[in-house]
Image (cartoon, rainbow, N blue to C red):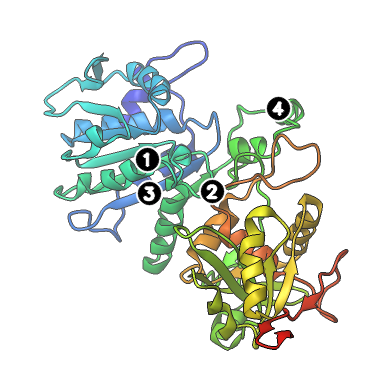
Amino acid sequence: MYMGFLIKFGGHTPKHDMRRVTTWQMKDMEMAIWNDKIDYTKIPLETVHNKNRRSAKTKDATRLAVFFALLNKEVKWRSAYGAQQTMAKFWYLLNPFVHKINHQENNVYIRGPTNYPINLGILSPANVTGVECDVAMFDEGGWVFKHLKLYEAYKNARPMVAPSDFKHVIHFSTPARYSAFQEAWLEVESFAEEIGTQLTVLRTWKDCPWIDEEFLKYEERMNADCPWYINQNYKGIWVVYGGAVFNNFYDVNDKVHVPKDIRENWSDIQSDKGGVDWNGEFTKHYLVLGKVIPQYVFIKEELKFTDIAFLKQYMHHHSLELEDDDPFSDQFADNAKEMGIICSYFGWDMPYKMERVRQVQIRTVIIDKAKCPKTWQNFQEAAFDKNSRLPALEKRPDQHGLDGTLHMVHPEAGDVSYKRMPKRVRARVFTGDGWN
């Protein structure tokens, strides 16, 4: 009845039409309203909508918000940034059930006997702490990266629906890796699989007859220097801004991409290689352990340590590589040599580092996400340097797991072939009788 009313009486402009709706838009909205597998008096009905630009995701979200408000439910709409609410307010004003918008309060008032206006706000402590609602709507969570304060606000916003007996949580965004939106997608998709239902949806430009292929080709041409632009905005692919370096890594528990024999025998796969990334006292040094074969890189553990002697328990059972030959690393590498750590000492510039990256790219990477959270994060975030003429990793201060992995993927005879192979050395040790 509600949608029939909108189709007949909804507002429109030459470019925007509240009356227009497709079959899949109806299905997506229905998915967010009711599911017979979810008792939303106890747990939220949480849905995640990965939709491309110009797929009407904001229009549909405003339709849902007004529908819930007409049911006398309290709706809170939270965005990563204030500017993202501009289009939402435009669509609200085209809805005939909307009476007015108070821009100072950021409230959308509904016609009829409802007690609650729809409240819009950015993700901030003031807008999520001590706030309750029945329906929490998260707009453009793909911009809520986990290293930002926005992410903390997002996590604190989720309990807004806890006291409600009509718990609904709705996410809608274009995708980006290591964001609140991707976290919601993965967790909700896994939960939906467990209970045998659908709670996530992907829509791309192919679902939108109003987006021409010629337009997409033109956009691709105009953004040739931005390889992730089309994938994120129109194809629904999880991207890294700047261009993802790795698209070939999976958690060992991923039933879709990881073969069954690897999942079931993971504990029997013995790591025989290790790579060390040196850091300061606060961050600690990182040791990444795993195994490299022609088809796979297995990343089993990441370990943090401060005492370099810690490496002695691994050097006889693992082929280790330690970073050397730069002013920061030299101090630690020299100490390791003094202690007699048996390993390869290897320093690299970007071309040699990118050779290691290539060796990882041509294999499938299986990571024990639970034991290697930093390494998993680094693979998610690894991007190309947009300012480099040649392919180069974007330099980040927290790539400890990735750098450890690149050192772990070092060559050995009969294993893999590299352009440059560091020598495995046994450090000279000073004793009372001199150097040995």
Element carrying mark 3: strand
**Depth check: 74 or 9 in front?**
74
**Depth check: 232 or 18 in front?**
232
Q: Nearer the viewer's eye, disc 4 or disc 2?
A: 2
- The residue wearing badge 3 is 47
Q: Is the residue under label 4 in contact with that under label 3 (CB below 8 Å)? A: no
- The quarter of the rendered structure image containing the C terminus is bottom right
- The residue wearing badge 4 is 219
The spot of residue 219 in percent (x, y) is 70, 27
Q: Nearer the viewer's eye, disc 3 or disc 1?
A: 1
- The residue wearing badge 2 is 177
Task: From this view, report whether residue 16 is shown above or below residue 244.
Answer: above
- The residue wearing badge 1 is 149
Residue at (48%, 41%) from the top-left corner? Answer: 142
Q: Is 353 left or right of 44, judged from the image as shown? A: right
Under mark 4, the amino acid is Glu
Under mark 1, the amino acid is Lys
Q: Residues within 10 Å of mark 3 (few under 14, many from 20)?
A: many
Residue at (69%, 72%) from the top-left corner? Answer: 321
| Alpha carbon separation for disc pair 3 and 2 | 18 Å
